[in-house]
Amino acid sequence: MREDGFIGAVEWAVAGRALPGQRVSGDRSVVLDAGGGSVLFAVLDGLGHGAAAADASDRAAQVLSENRAEPLDVLMLLCHRAMSDTRGAAVSLALFDARDRVHWLGVGNVESRIVAAAPGKPAVRATVLLTGGIVGYLLPPNLSPQTVPVRPGDLLLMSTDGITANFGDGIDLSKPTSEITADILARHAKDTDDALVLAARHRGHSHPSQPIPSVKP
C-alpha cells in the first residue's frame, strides 16, 4: 500500500504492507485536513496482526475522521472508547498547525520523530515521548501532548514496530516523501510483523496546495 499527496504546506506519503502470508494489515495511517491550516496525521498498530488487528485500527481511523478538530488528548480518549471491545492498538497522533509547530501524542510503540538536514547526515531534532499502554484496553491517565517547532524542510517520520529501529539511517532528505517511505519499507520492514511508515514534510507556506492525493497499487 502506498499513498501520497499535499495538504496545504505539508507534503506527505505512506508506505505499508501486511505480514507476509496475511491478507490484511493491522497497521493503518490517517491523513486529515483538520481545518485552519492544520493537518492531522495518525499511525495505528492493531495488536497482533490479521483481521482482528485491522478491525481495531479501522475503529480508531473512523473516530479520527469524524472528530478531526478535537484536541489530541480528546482524540486518544475517543479512540480508546471506540476500541473497547477490540484487541486495542498502539496509537500515535501528530498535528501540523498553521504556526509551524507539531503537536504530538503517543500511547504504545508507534514511534514519531522530526528529522532535519545536518552536516554529514540528517539529525533527529525531536522524538515523541511515548506512554505505555494499549488504546482500547489500558489508557494512561493525564495524557499531555507535546509541542515542537518545525522549519521548512523538516521531516516527520512515524513508524510501527514492523519497521526496524535504525530505519532513519541513510535517509536522503532531498527525495520526495513518496520515495523516502518506499525506501524505508523496502529496506527496513521486518518479516515477522505488519509494517507501515509515514513521512510528512513542512514545505513552507508559499508552496502550492495539491489536496488530492495519488494512490499507487
Image: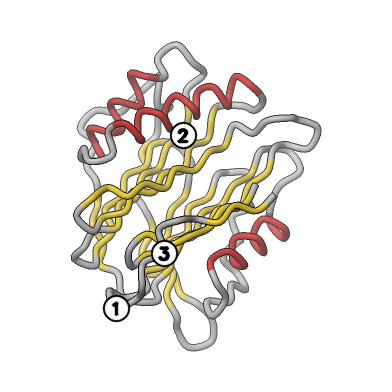
| Left or right of 91 on screen, residue 173 | right
Q: Nearer the viewer, residue 162 or 8?
A: 8
| Left or right of 77 on screen, residue 155 | right
Mark 1 to mark 3 CA distance (whole Å): 12 Å
Label 3 environment density (alpha carbons within 10 Å; few <14, some 14–19, many ≥20)? few
The picture places residue 36, in percent across and down from the top left corner, at 19, 55
37 lies above or below 116: above
Where disc 3 sits, the SS reads loop
Residue shown at 56%/65% (left/top)? 168
Specify how the rendered protein is coloured. Answer: secondary structure
Query: Residue 210 bears which disc, if any?
Result: 3
Q: Nearer the viewer, mark 2 or mark 1?
A: 1
The picture places residue 10, in percent across and down from the top left corner, at 37, 64
The picture places residue 19, in percent across and down from the top left corner, at 72, 36
Where disc 2 sits, the SS reads strand
Pointer 1 residue: 206
Please, what is the three-letter code of the amino acid marked with disc 3? Gln
Pointer 2 residue: 90
Q: Nearer the viewer, mark 2 or mark 3?
A: 3
| Left or right of 39 on screen, residue 124 | right
